[in-house]
Structure formats: C-alpha cells, structure tokens
Amino acid sequence: MPKETVRLNVTLAAEYGVKLTRLAERTHVREGALASLLLSQAIDEADVDARQIVELLERIPGAWARIEQGIEDARGGRTIPIDQL
C-alpha cells in the first residue's frame, strides 16, 4: 500500500454488496481491491461543484439524518479521533 493512502470503512446496501461480490469473482480480484478501484474512479469522475454534492446527498435515503446524527455525536463526545482508528 502506498504511504499516502486514506483508509475508509464503507457500508454498502445489500444489493450493491452482492453485485460487488459477483464482479470480484468474475474478475478474480479481491472485493476490497475492486471496491477501492471503483471508488477511486468515481471520485476522479465526480464534479467538485458543491451544488452537485448537495444534490447527490439529497438522493441518498437517510443521508441528512445520518449527517445530523454524526454532528450530534461529535458535539456529545461520542466519537473516536481519526488517528486512533
């Protein structure tokens, strides 16, 4: 792994998890490696216009509620510093 990497934990909806597993099996690549590649490609292709990011978030069911919960957790001290993960 290159020195300049960021580790993320991503939770996929069940149907995407199944699809990722099938793609990984067909390409003979580990699921994590394939997921990393696909996410990197999506990020490269993403428009950095903030208005489009907001539109994207609005299409994700429950996204705003999870964001608000994360903010409440951070304010309430119910978080783990990133350097301790």
Image: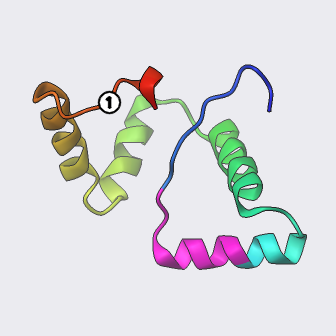
41 up-or-down from 47: above or below: below
Span colored in magenta? 11-21
Residue type (three-letter) at the residue carrying disc 1: Ile
Query: Which residue is identified by label 1?
Result: 80
**Looking at the picture, how far across and down is residue 6, in whole percent?**
61, 30
Against 52, residue 12 (above or below) is below
How crowded is the residue under tag 1: few (<14 C-alpha within 10 Å), some, or many (20+)?
few
30 up-or-down from 36: above or below:
below
Q: Residue 35's x, y, as percent?
A: 68, 56
x, y percent for residue 21: 69, 74
Q: Is 40 left or right of 18, judged from the image as shown?
A: right
Element under disc 1:
loop
When the figure is inspected, residue 15 is found, relative to residue 61, above or below; the finding is: below
Left of 64 or right of it: where is 84? Answer: right
Residue in the image at 80% along x and 26% along y:
2
What is the residue that sits farthest to the right in this orientation? 28
Residue 13 belongs to magenta span: yes
Give the residue at x 46% y 32%.
85
Task: Pick whichever, 1 or 42, lies toward us.
Answer: 1
Total numbered circles? 1
Question: Image point 76% across, 53% down: which residue?
Answer: 33
Q: Residue at x 76, y 20 (%)?
A: 3
Instruction: Report which quarter residue 76 is drawn in.
Output: top left
